[in-house]
Amino acid sequence: MKWGIIATWRMAYEGIMGAAEDLSQGLSAKDALENTIKAVEDYPFYKSVGYGGLPNEQGIVELDAAYMDGDNFNIGAVAGIQDVKNPISVARKLSNNRFNSFLVGSGATAYAQKNNFERINMLTERAKKIWENRLEEMKNSNLSPYDGHDTVGAVCLDKNKSMVAGTSSSGLFMKKQGRVGDSPLSGSGFYVDSEIGGATATGLGEDLMKGCLSYEIVRLMGEGLSPQAAADKAVYEFHDKLAKRKGKAGAFSLVCMNNKGEWGVATNVEFSFVVATDKESPKIYLANKGEGHTTIIEEASQEWLDAYEERIKRPIQ
Ligand code: GLY
């Protein structure tokens, strides 16, 4: 029986290792996806998700997350939630609600507290130091303060043919208080239909929202395109449209999987992602935009992996 999971960025690798083992033993996609994203949220050196995520311009870590069940289209989401250890778990719980399934700001935080989700101070010393350094840089330059919108997004298929999608992000570093990106928005940050497949996004939320690219990829897969063809068509056609009409397109990358466990990816910047299926052990890949509307995909080299490890743990002065 088929199963599979695909997720954005190298940071999902450890979570996917666990998920691959669990899915092969029959764990539900619901649990495997939540566990995968929790593993990323809990790791302090990932500075764009969960604990260790970079704060907004006030120095406050505001987190966005979403969870979608492709069997029944249930969606739960939080935006701007504070000091909650695992926003993905709150989003999953909210997905069971008929009403009030997307909560923001103090409402989301109060809901998590009332429902006994673990609360911790999500601002690590390391993230605080990076924020302080950026404030200093901004005093001395006109550079854009914005950076770092590497969302973890995942799409998962289990042996019972159920599919789910989820995201978690601290959003844009130095964002305005209350700013929300694509990650908790259905159709933009994620979408899944168990009878077709799912997709999820990472990148500049303000541009991703303009194209509803996760929905568009699922729609194209539903019309019969392979995941790779759907991702290439949706992502590069929209990139070109934005570049033509606005003069530029922000960075964005999408991954997708259909209900047979076949997968695809498209991106307008160098992008790492992780896949495991019943046919393929967990692997870290790099994707780059190729000629025309194509994507070049290669396995990450040991050199790339070592440089990544060094970069994320490099001491902050
Ligand atoms: N893609 C995450 C964000 O823009 O917030």
Image (spheres, rainbow, N blue to C red):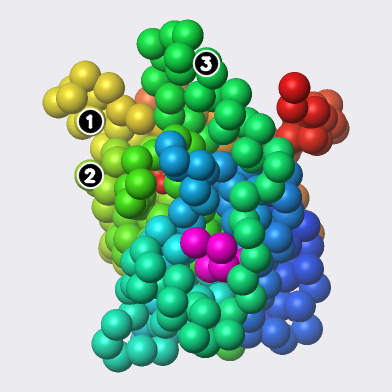
| Mark 1 nearby-residue class (10 Å; few <14, some 14–19, many ≥20) | some
Residue 115, percent across and down? 52, 87
Residue visible at 58% across and 85% down in the picture: 116
Element at label 3: helix
Residue range corresponding to the magenta coloring:
82-87
Residue pointed to by mark 2:
210
Q: Earlier in the sequence, mark 1 or mark 2?
A: 2
| Mark 3 nearby-residue class (10 Å; few <14, some 14–19, many ≥20) | few
| Mark 2 nearby-residue class (10 Å; few <14, some 14–19, many ≥20) | few
Above or below, 195 against 292 in this view is below
Residue visible at 45% across and 14% down in the picture: 139
Cα distance in 3D space between marks 3 and 2: 30 Å
Please name the amino acid that badge 2 sits on: Lys
Name the one closer to the observer, 176 or 308. 176
Q: Earlier in the sequence, mark 3 or mark 1?
A: 3
Residue 3, percent across and down? 64, 74
Instruction: Using residue 189 as the reference point, say whether residue 161 is left or right of it.
Output: right
What mark, if any, has residue 242 been given in the picture? 1
Above or below, 112 against 224 in this view is below
Above or below, 77 against 280 in this view is below
Is the Cβ of the residue at disc 1 closer than 8 Å to that at disc 2?
yes
Please name the amino acid that badge 3 sits on: Glu
Is the Cβ of the residue at disc 3 closer than 8 Å to that at disc 2?
no
Residue pointed to by mark 3:
137
